[in-house]
Each structure stands twice: as C-alpha cells, then as structure tokens.
Amino acid sequence: MRATRALGAAVVLLACGAAPLAHAADDGLSLAPAGSGRPSLYAEGAPGAVLEDTVSVTNRSAEPRTVTLRGAGPGGMEKWFAFARRKVTVPPRTRADVPFTVAVPEGAAPGDRSGAVVARGGGKDARVPLRLRVDGPALAALTVERVRLDADAGRITYELVNRGNTVLAPRVAVRADGVLGELLDRAPHRAAARVAPGSRVALSEPWSGVPSFDVVDVRLTVTAAGGVRAEGSASARLVPWPAVAAAGAGAVAAGVAGWFAVRHVVRRGRRDPRPPEAETAAAEAAAQREPAATGTGGKP
C-alpha cells in the first residue's frame, strides 16, 4: 500500500480477462487484490498514516451483481477502512477495481494486526485477508487465564490473552501432579492457534488418563518469541461420587477425608524435609530456655 491523504480514484470497470487470484463468494462473484499474483493484502505505516490499495470485484455471471464492501478486524479496526464506493454494481463478465484506504489512528500501538476486506453479494461473503504492521517498538506479552481441569471430558481448558502488540505463536508445556507424585508431563509444543494483539483465545489440552480419585494440581507454562513466559494453574479434587453413594456416604467420606489428610502430610513433607525427631528436640530445647514460673500470682 502507498501512503496518501485521499482516495483520489474512482471505481474502474474492466472486461474480464486474466484475473488475479480470487476469493470466491459463489460461482459467479469473487474478490481479490488488484493486480496479479497477490493472495492477500499487506500494509505498513506509522500511526497517523493513511495507506491506499485496490481490490477487484469480478462478476463472471450473466447477470449484474451488486456488492457491499467493508473492512473487518479486531479492536475496532473496521473503522479504519474507507472505500471509493461501498456499494458497487458490477455488470456481467466485468471486473470492478475499487480503491480503498486504511487510516491508522494517531494513538495506534505498534505491532501486527490481521484484518480483511469483505464483499457481500447475494447473501454470501467473499473476503481478502489484510495484514497490517504499525511501525514502532514491538512489545510481546501474554497471560494464561481460566485454567480448569475437566475430568469428565478428559481435557484441560485454558485461555491465552495477548497483552502486547505483536502476533504470538505460543508453545505450551503441561504438568499435572497428584497426591503420590507426577501424573502428566507434556513437553513444550505448538499451541493450536496464533494470538493476535488484544485478543483472547480459548484452547484445550486432551488428557485421557485423568484419575478418578485424586487431588490434582495442573500447571501450564506458555512461551513465545520476544522472551514471553507465562504460567497458569488450577487444582481439582476428583472423587467418584456415584461410587460414594453406592458404597455408603459415611464410610467413604471418612476414607476421602483420610486421603486428603495423607495428601496434606505428603505435601508438607515435601516442603519441610526435617524428621519428626528433629522437631521434638527443637521444642524441648526451647522449653528449657524459658524461665520457670513461681508463686500463685503469676509473677516470676
């Protein structure tokens, strides 16, 4: 795209000939970047710049077609687009070249954004992707939120939120521990989606080996280019309640309480490796250092 301050061009109608790579809405209507060989649109400029390009609407049918053009993108990006004409009627076997601009706001944060030019005609949409890079220092930041273990579905769900201004391709590592130790240790691997600036993406990790009776701690570690590292965690008490009801709530509840007590002792032991004898000896030494109380009035 070129930087400009006005559209400065009108819709141009051309007879269909060699057409650029098109994104079709149906058998007779297609949308593509003007020119030849471009599968998508690309624009780059500083905040405050107005960037210009052209799209081609091709009607290969035997009837006139009317389409409405608009811009699309996250965070209000659709408001940045302006077209020479938003509604265009294309005669049969004719291509209409429609200039448009993208006005980058003065306060736009630097980084990459993904949008599109969309043409609607006959109840169907055709679109051409637009990648926009706003010049300036890049900031890569990410958070991991709403981590949850869904034992019934056999999966760990979570959300990634891009807090920076660059598109991120995150990698995620998964760790799960139970009362007796490690249950799952999944090495870092590519997440199922790229995360655009300012967007929130819901993802999940399958886990077919979720235990039916345990206390599970799940931890996700997510990394991405630019030094991004973020963690999210969740805990879940897994109890087979149908089996509890069938076996008798009182007896099984006592067993569950005992199981959780074992968990507490095991985890406390991991935090404090001192043996019980050391704790007893420390308590006796502290008692010997305290002066003995005398009398009945509470005075030493």
Image (cartoon, grey):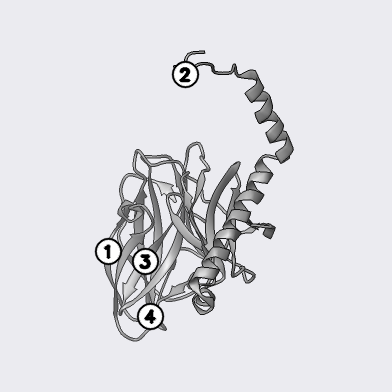
Which circle marks residue 296 in the picture?
2
- Of the two numbered discs 1 and 3 on the same chain, state the one appearing first in sequence: 1
Query: Disc 4 and disc 2: Cα gap in Å?
Result: 112 Å
Asked whether 275 or 296 is in front, the reply is 296
Asked whether 282 or 52 is in front, the reply is 282
Q: Between tags 3 and 4, which lies in front? A: 3
Q: Between tags 1 and 3, which lies in front? A: 3
Classify mark 1: residues with Cα within 10 Å, few (<14), some (14-19) or many (20+): few
Q: Amino acid at mark 4?
A: Arg
- Of the two numbered discs 4 and 2 on the same chain, state the one appearing first in sequence: 4
**Element type at mark 1:** loop
Asked whether 90 or 73 is in front, the reply is 73
Count of marks placed on residues: 4
Image position of 145 (left or right of 175):
left
Query: Disc 1 and disc 3: Cα gap in Å?
Result: 11 Å
The answer to whether the residue labelled 1 contacts the one labelled 3, judged by CB atoms less than 8 Å apart, is: no
Q: Which residue is mark 1?
A: 86
Query: Disc 4 and disc 1: Cα gap in Å?
Result: 20 Å
Q: Residue at x 54, y 69 (%)?
A: 251
Q: Amino acid at mark 1?
A: Arg
- Of the two numbered discs 3 and 2 on the same chain, state the one appearing first in sequence: 3
Which circle marks residue 118 in the picture?
3
**Element type at mark 2:** loop
Q: Between tags 4 and 1, which lies in front? A: 1
Query: Disc 3 and disc 2: Cα gap in Å?
Result: 92 Å
Q: Amino acid at mark 2?
A: Thr
Classify mark 4: residues with Cα within 10 Å, few (<14), some (14-19) or many (20+): some
Asked whether 58 or 179 is in front, the reply is 179
Q: Which residue is mark 4?
A: 93
Image position of 170 (left or right of 135):
right
